[in-house]
């Protein structure tokens, strides 16, 4: 009797195991992950779009989009192997490689660049009826700066420290959607995003509150920020957001797709070739307006670390010359 019960239970166990085990083809199919960003951010849109589109074009490849705090976290987790691919800002990638991320002297030097996605301008949002004319006017105020560990929060700290405000206001580490909600509820006086425009969270805030963008580029120029940090001046055109009647002077970082040095070269090549194909670029432009800058012409511009070998193979095939400092290394 006991043997019969044992045999039955064993049979049920084996059925369960076989029933839920992956097929041979699934087990052999390569799986890769890509680190995106917080909900409501452009990183999140791009990572989701990549993970949906690429497996449809590359037979046998599985890909998942993973939520994260954003740029800095992606640098760390791509380096460590938590993510195979990630979206990060050029400044964070370069500083991470030499151990100069905020309060972190570890060197994240296994990150390799693949291609340029879009420029990410700093956008400092306040209510239209408030008297703030400069970022320096926010001393003593509550300002959302992005998730802790994100590229937005890191860039905000660099900028506000440089102009002498960081120690004199109350930074709130909120993601973009949470910041927009807090802004609408009057819990914060301003919020900061470092992202392609138009940004969904800024638009969300503007639907219920008249907003205005602060010209942070003016403070950057006055204080020598561009000499101290590797950001570039840019302009957010008038009309980008509801009620924005004037161009906004600001600065931007470059958003790059990255991978790790030991990720399979052929997988990197196939993903690069797929995303920067004519159809791949069109798909991304339909997914988010910031992808208008993603092109074969822009290629890997502003890359701040060497290219991955698989990416370099693709760029050479389409006629792009790779400068010495971006040549692949082991």
Image (cartoon, rainbow, N blue to C red):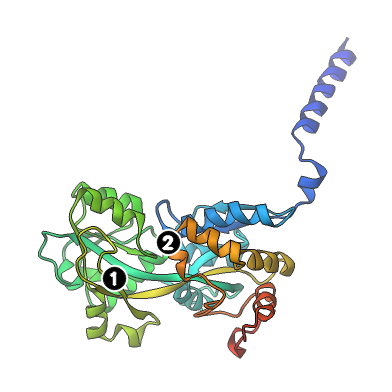
Quarter residue 216 falls in: bottom left
- Residue 233: give x, y in percent of width and height: 33, 80
Is 71 on the left-hand or right-hand side of 81?
left
Tell me the SS state at disc 2. helix
Residue 279 vs residue 15, the one in the foreground: 279
Residue corresponding to mark 2? 289
Visible residue check, residue 145: yes
Q: Could you tell me which residue is drawn at 60 percent across and 80 percent down?
A: 306
Q: Could you tell me which residue is drawn at 33 percent across and 77 percent down?
A: 234
- Residue 9: give x, y in percent of width and height: 81, 20
Alpha carbon of mark 1 to alpha carbon of mark 2: how far?
A: 14 Å
* Picture disc at residue 59: none
Residue furthest top as drawn? 1
**Residue 35 higher or lower than 14, as above or below:** below
| Mark 1 / mark 2, whichever is N-terminal | 1
Quarter residue 12 falls in: top right
Residue furthest bottom as drawn? 324
Residue corresponding to mark 1? 237
Indicate the quadrant containing the N terminus: top left, top right, bottom left or bottom right. top right
Indicate the quadrant containing the C terminus: top left, top right, bottom left or bottom right. bottom right
Visible residue check, residue 103: no
Residue 22 vs residue 42, the one in the foreground: 42
Quarter residue 166 falls in: bottom left
Mark 1 surroundings within 10 Å by alpha-carbon count, few (fewer than 14), some (14 through 19), many (20 or more): some
Q: Could you tell me which residue is drawn at 39 percent across and 59 percent down?
A: 148
Tell me the SS state at disc 1. loop
- Residue 133: give x, y in percent of width and height: 14, 70
- Residue 174: give x, y in percent of width and height: 33, 54
Circle count? 2
């Amino acid at each position: 009797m006991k043997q019969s019960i044992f045999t039955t239970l064993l049979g049920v166990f084996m059925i369960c195991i076989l029933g839920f085990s992956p097929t041979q083809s699934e087990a052999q199919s390569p799986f890769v992950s890509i680190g995106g960003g917080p909900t409501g951010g452009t990183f999140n849109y791009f990572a989701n779009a990549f993970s949906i589109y690429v497996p449809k074009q590359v037979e046998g490849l599985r890909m998942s989009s993973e939520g994260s705090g954003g740029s800095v976290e992606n640098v760390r987790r791509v380096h460590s192997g938590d993510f195979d691919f990630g979206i990060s800002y050029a400044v964070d990638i370069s500083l991470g490689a030499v151990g100069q991320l905020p309060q972190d002297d570890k060197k994240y030097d296994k990150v390799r660049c693949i291609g340029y996605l879009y420029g990410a301008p700093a956008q400092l949002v306040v209510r239209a009826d408030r008297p703030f004319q400069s970022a320096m006017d926010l001393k003593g105020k509550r300002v959302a700066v992005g998730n802790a560990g994100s590229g937005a929060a890191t860039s905000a700290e660099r900028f506000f420290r440089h102009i002498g405000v960081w120690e004199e206001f109350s930074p709130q580490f909120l993601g973009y959607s949470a910041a927009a909600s807090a802004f609408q509820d009057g819990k914060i006086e301003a919020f900061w995003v470092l992202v392609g425009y138009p940004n969904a969270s800024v638009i969300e805030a503007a639907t219920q509150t008249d907003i205005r963008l602060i010209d942070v580029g003016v403070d950057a120029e006055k204080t020598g920020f561009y000499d101290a940090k590797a950001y570039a001046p840019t302009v957010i055109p008038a009309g980008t957001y509801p009620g924005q009647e004037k161009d906004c002077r600001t600065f931007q970082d470059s958003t790059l797709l990255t991978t790790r040095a030991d990720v399979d070269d052929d997988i990197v090549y196939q993903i690069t070739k797929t995303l920067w194909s004519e159809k791949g670029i069109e798909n991304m432009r339909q997914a988010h307006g910031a992808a208008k800058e993603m092109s074969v012409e822009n290629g890997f511009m502003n890359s701040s670390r060497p290219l991955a070998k698989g990416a370099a193979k693709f760029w050479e095939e389409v006629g792009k010359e790779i400068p010495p400092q971006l040549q692949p290394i082991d």
